[in-house]
Image (cartoon, helix red, strand yellow):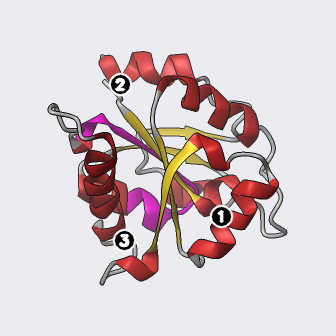
Amino acid sequence: MIRTVIFDHDAIFCADGSLCRGADGFIRACAVRFPLLLTSAAARADAEKLLGRNELAPLFLDILTAAEVENPKPAPDLLIATLGRIGFLLRDRNPVQPGECLVVESSGTGIEAARRAGMRSLAVTHHAAAELGGADFVRSSFEAADLDDILRRCRA
């Protein structure tokens, strides 16, 4: 069962700062059902600016950056910190467990970090698909990512 979705900055934004094709719809579909967080190797201010420009800022509970942890990907540090932040923000008596998180990534190091953190992963292949084979789900684009299908498979 998935209870939160963590998006990586590079999975949803192109190099020019525009949203990747289909990302807006997928993010909005996730936001209706789950709390969302964003992780980023970029500075927090840059990530906030891009979310604001694309009218997505209200959909995300928080942004965590690589500067907030000691070890970068593929270490799971940023995702573990994100899990702690979601627990703090939601103040839920039934805390979200790693296996209840879906991490949306576009890099092999991000997929490895999700695996090490015990989280499920959706790889969106903006880059070389071969390095994303370790993901639980691999899709060619956000348009090819069926949220209901992914959720069904997570319950199986």
| 74 w.r.t. 94: above or below | below
- What is the CA distance from the residue labelled 3 to the residue labelled 2? 23 Å
- Is 14 on the left or on the right of 111, as rendered? right
- What is the CA distance from the residue labelled 2 to the residue labelled 1? 30 Å
Q: Position of residue 85 (x, y in %)?
A: 32, 55
Contact (CB < 8 A) between labels 3 and 1? no
Q: Which residue is mark 2?
A: 154
Q: Which residue is mark 1?
A: 48
Front: mark 2 or 1: 1
Q: Along the polypeptide, which appears first: circle 2 or circle 1?
A: 1
Label 1 packing within 10 angstroms: few (<14), some (14-19), many (20+)? some
Q: Which residue is mark 3?
A: 74
What element does badge 1 sit on?
helix
Q: Along the polypeptide, which appears first: circle 3 or circle 2?
A: 3
Q: Along the polypeptide, which appears first: circle 3 or circle 1?
A: 1
The C terminus, quarter of image: top left
Q: Position of residue 135 (x, y in %)?
A: 43, 46
Q: Which mark is residue 102?
A: none
Residue visible at 69% across and 37% down? 142
Q: Nearer the viewer, residue 64 or 76?
A: 64
Q: Position of residue 19 (x, y in %)?
A: 79, 52
Q: Position of residue 35 (x, y in %)?
A: 45, 36
The quadrant holding residue 28 is top right
Label 2 packing within 10 angstroms: few (<14), some (14-19), many (20+)? some
Magenta stretch: give its range: 99-112
- What is the CA distance from the residue labelled 3 to the residue labelled 1? 24 Å
Is 122 one of the magenta-colored residues? no
What element does badge 3 sit on?
loop
